[in-house]
Image (cartoon, grey):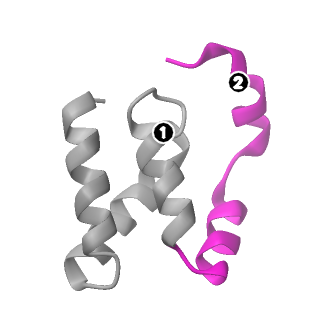
Amino acid sequence: MNQYANYLIQFLLEIWKNTPEGNEIKEMVFKHFQEMCRKKYSSFICELFINIISTEEKIKLIKTLDLDYLLKSNNQLQ
């Protein structure tokens, strides 16, 4: 939710994407993706996350999302 923390998380995710530390960050983003993608600053983290995860991880992510919820709340971005 913090605009400056957003930059830090993106930076760490980018440089640590294939490390144990990066995996911890990716797991946190995965668990909170649905709420993060709706918020102004954390949505940038979600965008980077989608770009760096594997196809298998993308499929897993899609299966966990409540797409109805996301579509209905599209006009209520925070």
| Camera-side residue of 60 and 45 | 45
Residue drawn 70% across the image and 73% down it: 59
Q: Earlier in the sequence, mark 1 or mark 2?
A: 1
Quadrant of the snapshot with the N terminus? top left
Q: Quadrant of residue 75?
A: top right
Residue occupied by mark 2: 74
Residue 10 vertical position relative to residue 55 in the rendered view, above or below? above
Is residue 2 visible in the rendered structure shown here?
no
Residue occupied by mark 1: 43
* Image-based side of 3 in relation to 71, left or right: left
* Image-based side of 3 in relation to 50, left or right: left
Q: Marks 1/2: CA distance?
A: 13 Å
In the image, the segment drawn in magenta is 53-78
Q: Position of residue 11 (x, y in %)?
A: 26, 57
Q: What amino acid is at disc 2?
A: Asn
Q: What amino acid is at disc 1?
A: Ser
Residue 13 vertical position relative to residue 65 in the rendered view, above or below? below
Q: Position of residue 9 (x, y in %)?
A: 25, 52
Q: Position of residue 28 (x, y in %)?
A: 34, 59
Is residue 49 visible in the rendered structure shown here?
yes
Residue drawn 28% across the image and 41% down it: 6
